[in-house]
Amino acid sequence: MAPMTAMPSNAVVIVGGGLAGLTAAYHLHRNGLDFTLVEARNRLGGRILTADPKTDVSQDGFDLGPSWFWPDINPAVGEFARKLELPFFPQYSDGAMVFQRSRETAPERYDTMRQPPISMRLAGGIGAVVSALAGRLPRASLRLATKVTRIEKTAAGVKVRFRGGDGSANDIEACHVVLALPPRLLAETIIFDPVPTDQVQKLWRDTPTWMAPHAKVFALYDRPFWREAGLSGAARSMVGPLVEIHDATTSTGKAALFGFVGVAAPTRNQAGRDAIINASIAQLAQLFGPEALDPISTLIKDWADDPLTATPLDQIAGDHPQGGRREWVDQTWRNWISLAGSETAINDPGYLAGAIEAGEGAAMTLISRRDGDRSSLDLGCVDRSRS
């Protein structure tokens, strides 16, 4: 086993570098509260992944995770984008939608009308919000390729144990831990001492992880030829393997179609990635014409096959995570940890809006405690001298 080394104390440790964790870090930093953000992946963003044709993170790519937000029903996302000075544009919807009823009948076309709520996309992809937030944080406070394995309550606060990419084990002493990852993943991957109550652990495991059972396939083209044929790029299918398809052309004109795979994760795994991609391209040709048979590149992201997103419980699609107030932490841990994954949001759990709400809520609670709001629980060892 690699040697264990001690790490300096921190006011707050944030576990998870997705939108919720980055939002929490952004507000803590703006309010002068020290933090260390620990992310198991070698990139920030979590389920936000804007990628180039090689699936590398891109500043002008294709959204393998979330693609849209709806300012009319999720105003917090639009306001956050404006605060970060991120332009956005409406999802392309001009032209007809295609409906595939069966393999025996020709696809049907239906005229579409743009109706609210209008789906909006960030210029450069949803990953633009990740870059914008990361650029506003001190680089020394971000630790990538670092997986938290154990969280222990001590006399002085909380000890967080993690393993780096080189295999070394390290401890961070903290006053509070913000757990900005899906509750189900938390229950499966981190050991707690003392162990949370059975009721809390059951709540964590019973909370579905947004996107975890799903997969997306992209076909990239030299131009959006479907638009020339009067098609919006939107399609619905009762045949598959893609069940919902959209125009994924970027704001800079990189042409693409993408679809959600309607085949369950175990069947996808058995069939293999190449078979899913080949069947998807054949289906796109049935829907949009023979030009769809010749993409310049393809992409697939199967979130159920991502161990930093999905657990064995996520292999079959279930219900969407529910909103509302819940007791995510038991009495023993209440002053020392808080859950801030998108699934824990009171409103819009699982969505981008939920991640922003959960991350901001966790941060503002800690800031108010630091500043001496005696109506809230004590933050414990956070240094009040900085307030």
Image (cartoon, helix red, strand yellow):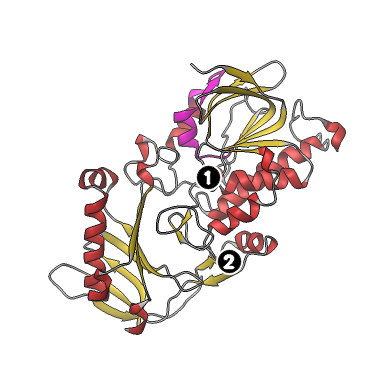
Q: Element type at marker 2?
A: loop
Residue receiving disc 1: 43
Q: Element type at marker 1?
A: loop
Q: Is residue 265 left or right of residue 53?
A: left
Q: Which of the two labelled residues, at mark 2 and mark 1, occupies the earlier sequence position?
A: 1
Report if residue 332 lies within the magenta region.
no
| Mark 2 residue type | Pro
**Marker disc for residue 234:** none
Task: Report the front residue among 143 and 305.
Answer: 143
In the displayed structure, 105 sits above or below 49; it is: below
Task: Report how far apart the C-alphas of labels 2 and 1 lie in the structure.
Answer: 27 Å
Q: Which residues are magenta?
A: 179-198
In the displayed structure, 6 sits above or below 113; it is: above
In the displayed structure, 119 sits above or below 313; it is: below
Q: Residue at x 40, y 45 (%)?
A: 212
Could you classify mark 2 by the number of other residues whose Cα lies within 10 Å: few (under 14), some (14-19), or many (20 or more)? some
Residue receiving disc 2: 71
Q: Position of residue 369 (x, y in %)?
A: 77, 36
Q: Residue at x 50, y 33 (%)?
A: 186
Could you classify mark 1 by the number of other residues whose Cα lies within 10 Å: few (under 14), some (14-19), or many (20 or more)? some
Q: Position of residue 132 (x, y in %)?
A: 64, 56
Q: Position of residue 109 (x, y in %)?
A: 28, 79
